Image (cartoon, rainbow, N blue to C red):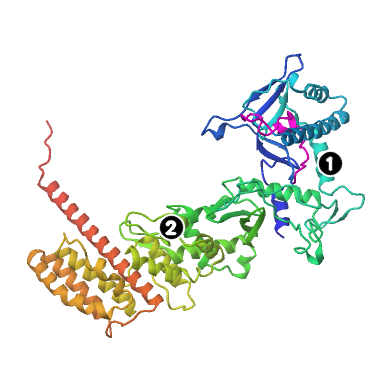
Amino acid sequence: MLLQWLAEQAERLEGLPPEFYRYRQIDWALVITTDGAAPSLADRRPPPKSRGEATVEAVPYVQRSGTRVPPFLLVDTAEFVLGRARGEGDEQGPSEKGVAEAARRRGEYLALLRRWADEVPDDPSAGLVLEVLTRGRAGIEVPPEVDARHTVGVLVDGRWLHERASVRELWARVVRERKGAGGAQQELCLVCGEPGDLLSTIPEPIKKGAIPSTGGSNEAQLVSVNSPAQGRGGAVKLVNTPVCDRCGSRSMAALNTMLASGRHRRSLSDGVLLWWTREPVDEPLIELIDDNDPDPDAVAHLIDTLHHTPDPAAAGRVDPNDFYALTLGLNNARTVVREWLDVPLHTVKANLGAWFEDHGVHDGWRGATRYLPLWHLTLAAGRHNGTQYVKGTAPHGIERELLHSALRRTPPPARLLPLLLQRIRADHRIDAPRTALLRLALNRSHDRTDRPMPRLDSDSTDPAYLCGRAFAVLEAIQTAALPDVKATIGDKYFGTAMTAPAAVLANLRHGANAHLKRLRRDKPGAHTALSERLAQVLGALTDDPPTHLSPREQARFVIGYEQQRAADFAAKAAATAAKAAAKAAKAAANTPDEQPS
């Protein structure tokens, strides 16, 4: 199914290279003119840090491996085109083996070029290029900076020869010959379901560097069986995966094109996600997951899709479009297909709506729900050094697992909750991203009653949640009474309070009496507000604080603590704004009206 949908996507993608072609950077152009001028090599390499100025062309390409690799037609390395041996620019010079290999490669390159020239006798450019190259070094001045690995293309009167239809036709035949296609008998293709020339191996690998990897990066095959021990019945190559030449080339061309596209690609720490739809869509989907400030209307639409199930009549009018997502990793020269998602588009919209609804955190300062980008949630699962989250400290694979949770509407990995609680105890950092992760873990638990709200729930009677709220109020009382305190009760006792609140809250409540006494003397307004708030929270506890909290209860404690703090900050900001507005109104009322002159 994967190859089938990739082959279908190839018919819709724009900018897809011709069959058995790939976009590559050309480093040097062999410039030839028909007016008799001497041929020359023009440097096409971009300046440092200016990759956007590189000469990138769709040129003949096919995977080649081994020690005696065959040539490409017209566009190849300087070793093939010019016979330049590896190490020729070094002080010690090339080895005898390197010189011999360069001579062999150039000979096979010229033989392939001669084959093209013989097939197009009416094209003078073919014969001209062959004549220029067979002169050897005597006919072309090769600059010393030309490396054997540099790619060389051929320009005749300002036009690239690899763009000609005769070159494309011959190259397609050559590739089919090399890859086992083009036999007399056609067989059924597993991808398109039609008889065709079957390939022995996929002609084009995944481009080097297209899949992020922590180790070495090589060109990787999507389908490959090299050893009889790996294949069913001892079969190797594509014997058990019959793919015709067209489906094999088109599916890999589509895959490489999307890997190079920012529209369909999202890099992960240990791989890459590709996604597309059967029919094009204009609305954002995966982009919203990474948006620092997603469009509220787009998010509201997704959440609305989640909650409004169409009736049977309306269901028949639902957009029949499909959504595909492919998560790839790399294992040396093999592609690892970690996940393949094939669902209706309206299903993935509902799943994304659930993602936003399940992790959103109320922002008291803006009076709106805040949605965190996936990259920020991933960082929040790592270590905080007091200033920022430290890159590379998040658990391996957590980003991919969170993305899986978003697209499939499944619980986050079981390891997330205990790991996050341990991080909070260790670095004393509680913020919107970590609160969002805690909400996500609780909202997607097996307990359907465990659904924390995105903002302060003043009606909740959950003991763990109320203990977290009480701790936040006690901390606010301390900081209001002692604004210059260096270490708050949160710095000293939060880790203990979130696991065993009964051992901490009683002592902290007793110690708060002195702070309340000072507030009553110095800040009577703050004393009234905070004492009433503390009484309200503690009064909601119908029993003594729990002696021990489970991991899920610890999460509710932290959420209650953070939501109480957010509500307090919002109330303080609102009071400050109201006071400033009243002061401005009073000043305006006392200002005499200007009299006309």
Q: In this view, does 374 lie to the left or right of 423?
A: right
Residue annotated with mark 1:
173
The label on residue 379 is: 2
Relative side of 255 to 483, left or right: right
Q: Specify whether 498 is left or right of 241.
A: left
Q: In this view, does 546 lie above or below 586?
A: below
Magenta range is: 66-94
User: Residue 281: x and y, percent?
Assistant: 60, 51
Indicate yes or no whether the magenta region holds residue 457: no
Does residue 519 sit above or below 64 in this rendering? below
Q: Which numbered tag is attached to residue 317? A: none
Which quadrant holds residue 479?
A: bottom left
Q: How many marks?
A: 2
SS for tag 2? helix
The alpha-carbon separation of the residues under discs 2 and 1 comes to 50 Å
The residue closer to the viewer here, 195 or 592, is: 195
> Residue at the spot x=39%, y=63% of the render?
434
Between 291 and 256, the residue placed more toward the observer is 256
Quarter containing the N terminus: bottom right
Neighbours of disc 1 within 10 Å: few (<14), some (14-19), many (20+)? some
Instruction: Please state which of residues 91 and 554 is positioned toward the viewer in this rendering.
Output: 91
Residue 32: x %, y % from top left: 73, 20
Relative vertical location of residue 93 with respect to residue 393 in this rendering, above or below: above
Q: Do the residues labelled 2 and 1 touch (CB within 8 Å)?
A: no
Q: Which amino acid does label 1 sit on?
A: Arg
Three-letter amino acid code at the position of disc 2: Leu
Asked if one can make out residue 289 in the rendered structure from this viewpoint, the answer is: yes
